[in-house]
Image: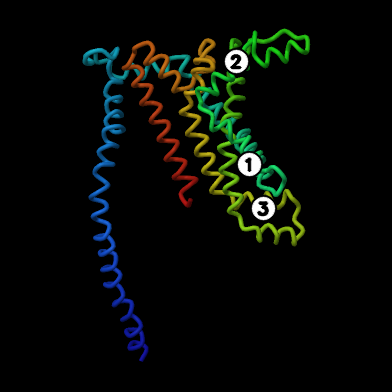
Amino acid sequence: MSQTSSVTAAAPSIARAPVTSRRKRSQIRGKLPVIVLFLPPALLIFTIFVILPMGEAAWYSFYNWNGYGLPTQWVGTRNYELIFNNGAFRQALINNGLIILVSLIIQIPLALWIATMVTQRIKGAVVFRLLFFLPYVLADVAAGMIWRFVYDGQFGLVAGIFRSMGLEAPFVLADKQVAFYAVLVVIVWKYFGFHMMLFVAGLQGIDKSVLEAADIDGATGWQKFHRVTLPLLGSTVRLSVFFAVVGSLQLFDMIMPLTGGGPSNATQTMVTFLYTFGIMRMQVGFGSAVGVVLFIICVTLAFGYKRIFMKND
C-alpha cells in the first residue's frame, strides 16, 4: 500500500518535469530573436572600444615607443620594472590608498550622517539635499579650477582668511607637505553628496513600521540606527563603498587643474601619473604599462569586492 501511494505521489512531479523543461525552452526561443538582434551590435562596439584598446595597450607595454610609426624596439618587461622602481609611481599608489582610506573613514560616514538628517521631516530638508548634492553635479575640471583659486596664496579665500587674522597667507598647493591634504578636502567636498543621495534613497526604502516598533520597544536613537537602520542599509553601504574605491582609483579630472600632480609629484594619482609620464612625455610604451597595471588593480579590486561582499546583493 505504501509503495502504491509513493508511486502515485511521485507521478505528478515526474509529469511536471517535462512541462517545466518545455516551458524553459519556449522562453529561451522567445528571447532568441531579441538576443540575435541586440547582442551583436553591443558586442561589436564593446570589442572595438574596450577589448581592442586593452589588447593594444598590453602589446605596446612591451616596447620602448614614442607613439610615432610602428613600435619596433622590444624591451620585454623593462617598462614594468621601471614603473615599480619609480618613486613618483610609488607615491601615486600611496596617494590612491589614502584617498580610499579617507573615503571610507570620513566621506561615507559623513554622507550617511547627513542623509539621516535630511530624510527627517524638517523644514527645508529638500533644499539641504540640493545644496549638499550640488558639488557632485559640478564638473570635476570646474571644481578643480575653483578650488585652485580658493587655495591661491595671493588672491584666494584661504589667503584672505589668514590675512584677516593678521597671519601670513600660505601657498597651500605649493607646499609639498600640505598640498595632498588640501586635495583630500576637495575630494570629500566634491563626492560626499553622491553617497549622501544613495543613502537617502536607501533610507526612504526602509519600512517605517520597523522604526515605529523600535520606538514602542523603547529603543534609543543610537540603538535604532545601530540595530535597525544600519543593517537594513547594508546593501546600500556596500554599493557606496564599491563606488568610492573604484572612483578613487580613477581620479584624474579634478587633480590636473588643481595641482597637475605637483608639487614634486606629491599629489600624483595613478591616472595622473599615466598622463604625465606616458602621454605628455611621449613615452607611450611606458604609459601603456602603467595603464595595464592600473587596469589589473581596478579589475582585481572590483571583481574581488563584488565576489566577497556583494555576492548576495
Earlier along the polypeptide chain: callout 2 or callout 1?
A: 1
Residue located 37% across and 24% down the image: 291
Q: Quadrant of the N terminus?
A: bottom left
Give me the C-alpha separation between circle 2 and circle 3: 44 Å
**Which of marks 3 and 2 precedes in the sequence?**
2
Q: Kindly report the distance in space between the C-alpha atoms of the residues bearing marks 2 and 1.
A: 30 Å
Residue 78 spot, x, y in % from top left:
32, 16
Mark 1: which secondary structure? Answer: helix
Residue farthest along the bottom direction in this orientation: 1
Q: How many marks?
A: 3
Amino acid under disc 1: Leu
Q: Amino acid at mark 2?
A: Phe
Residue 181 placement (x, y as % from top left):
61, 20
Disc 2 packing (10 Å; few <14; some 14–19; many ≥20): some
Badge 3 local density, few (<14 within 10 Å), some, or many (20+)?
Answer: few
- Counting from the top left corner in percent of width and height, residue 38 is at 27, 47
Residue 112: give its label: 1
Helix, strand or loop at label 3? It is helix
Q: Is residue 64 visible?
A: no
Q: Is residue 303 visible?
A: yes
Residue assigned mark 3? 227
The numbered dot on residue 149 is 2
Q: Secondary structure at mark 2?
A: helix
For this rendering, which residue is in front, 202 or 303? 202
Quadrant of residue 48 within the rendered picture: top left
Callouts 2 and 1 close, C-beta under 8 Å: no
Q: Position of residue 209 (x, y in %)?
A: 66, 61
Task: Say if mark 2 contacts mark 3, CB within 8 Å.
Answer: no
Of circles 2 and 1, which is in front? 2
